[in-house]
Image (cartoon, helix red, strand yellow):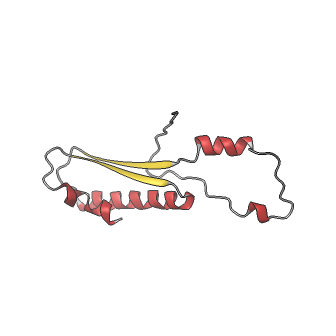
């Protein structure tokens, strides 16, 4: 299978869904697939949004880092929810982390 991935910053914006076009007066289908729609679906709108947090250098997180992670995750959730995109969260922890469940607690609460 062919797959493609793009890397974005945490504050990326996914274009909002345009619903209700069929209800507009004068709506007419010009063909089966429009070129712009195909380009958008293949190259702009992801099917899966993967959010990665790299904590491999830290044994514990300070409260400001935790707040930033929660804010970034909430933003990604809003982007995914608006477009019905699957969201996958990947957290890389320090090899000596004694309690990985506690470190990932703020992520699990979201």
The number of numbered badges drawn on the structure is 0
31 to 103, vertically: above or below: above
Front one among 53 and 90? 90
Q: Residue at x 39, y 61 (%)?
A: 71
Residue 12 location (% of width, % of height):
50, 50
Front one among 4 and 15? 4
Residue 15 location (% of width, % of height):
60, 53
- The image quarter in which residue 67 lies: bottom left
Residue 6 location (% of width, % of height):
49, 39
Left or right of 85, for residue 95: left
Front one among 53 and 87? 87
Left or right of 84, for residue 91: left
Q: Residue at x 59, y 40 (%)?
A: 43
Left or right of 6, for residue 71: left
76 to 95, vertically: above or below: below
Q: Residue at x 17, y 50 (%)?
A: 59
- The image quarter in which residue 82 lies: bottom right
């Amino acid at each position: 299978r062919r797959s493609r991935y793009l890397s974005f910053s945490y504050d990326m914006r996914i274009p909002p869904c345009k619903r209700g076009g069929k209800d507009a007066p004068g709506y007419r289908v010009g063909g089966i697939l429009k070129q712009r729609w195909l380009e958008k679906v293949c190259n702009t709108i992801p099917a899966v949004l993967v959010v990665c947090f790299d904590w491999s250098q830290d044994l514990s997180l300070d409260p400001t880092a935790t707040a930033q992670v929660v804010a970034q995750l909430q933003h990604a959730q809003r982007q995914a929810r608006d477009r019905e995109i699957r969201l996958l969260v990947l957290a890389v922890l320090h090899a000596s982390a004694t309690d990985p469940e506690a470190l990932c607690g703020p992520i699990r609460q979201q």
